[in-house]
Amino acid sequence: MTCAIKTADLCDRHGDTEHFQIAEPAFRSYGGQPSFCGEIATLKVFEDNVLLRQALEQKVEGKVLVVDGGASHRCALLGEDLAKLALDNGWSGIIVYGCIRDTAAIAGLPIGVRALHAHPLKSHKRGHGERDILITFAGVNFRSGHYVYADEDGIVVSSSKLV
């Protein structure tokens, strides 16, 4: 889902509340949709994307998958096929605290994707990880059911829907 409101405007209106967080500027935009927002679903994995695929196989309406990949720079958790799967199943965006690959193809897809870096090696397939738990990175606590807003200026998180 494209967000009609900018994160700077959200900060001006809500940035002084205790239920509002701003992520550290560590992420690059890779998807063809520079602004996106939605309800958060969380995932914690390390160099293994089996649960990532399972999550993206679920039909949703405008959710954002937030993935704590442990900031690994040794392989990619997301590639073109999974980004297409996310788009087909109604996800508005994916935020990966780790690496992705197939960046040129993902740039042509109308989905929001943020990640630390690109890496050409695919991940392992062991099925380890946890879903819908509190994850923390970039100075922000991400919880399933909370909301995330991302655009060219940054990423903000709120415990309630702001738009």
Image (tube, rainbow, N blue to C red):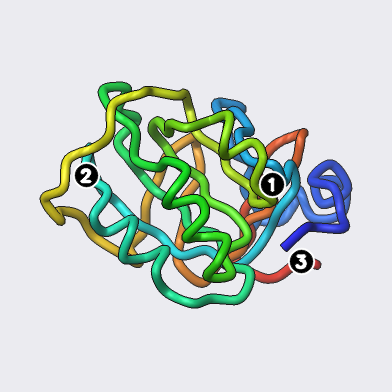
Q: Residue at x 88, y 48 (%)?
A: 9
Question: Residue visible at 55% across and 26% down?
Answer: 26
**N-terminal of the two: label 2 or label 1?**
2
Percent x, y of residue 125: 16, 47
Closer to viewer: mark 2 or mark 1: 2
Which image quarter: residue 106?
A: top right
Q: In which quarter of the view is residue 130 placed?
A: bottom left
In the image, what residue occupies the spot 47% across and 43% down? Answer: 80
**The quarter of the displayed image where residue 14 is located:** bottom right
As helix, strand or loop, the secondary structure at mark 2 comes to loop
Q: Residue at x 40, y 42 (%)?
A: 78
Dot 3 or dot 2, earlier in sequence: 2
Q: Helix, strand, or loop for circle 1? A: strand
Q: Foreground residue, 22 or 126? A: 126
Q: Secondary structure at mark 3?
A: loop
Q: Is residue 61 above or below residue 4?
A: below
> Which dot, 3 or 2, sits closer to the camera?
2
Q: Which three-letter amino acid code belongs to the residue tagged 3?
A: Leu
The residue pinned by badge 2 equals 48
Which residue does the numbered mark 3 point to in the structure image?
162
Q: Nearer the viewer, mark 3 or mark 1?
A: 1
Neighbour class for label 2 at 10 Å: few (<14), some, many (≥20)? Answer: many
Q: Are marks 3 and 2 in contact (CB under 8 Å)?
A: no
Label 3, label 1: how far apart the Cα atoms are: 13 Å
Specify whether 7 is left or right of 104. Answer: right
User: Callout 1, which amino acid?
Assistant: Ala
Q: Which residue is mark 1?
A: 150
Residue nearer the viewer, 18 or 28: 28
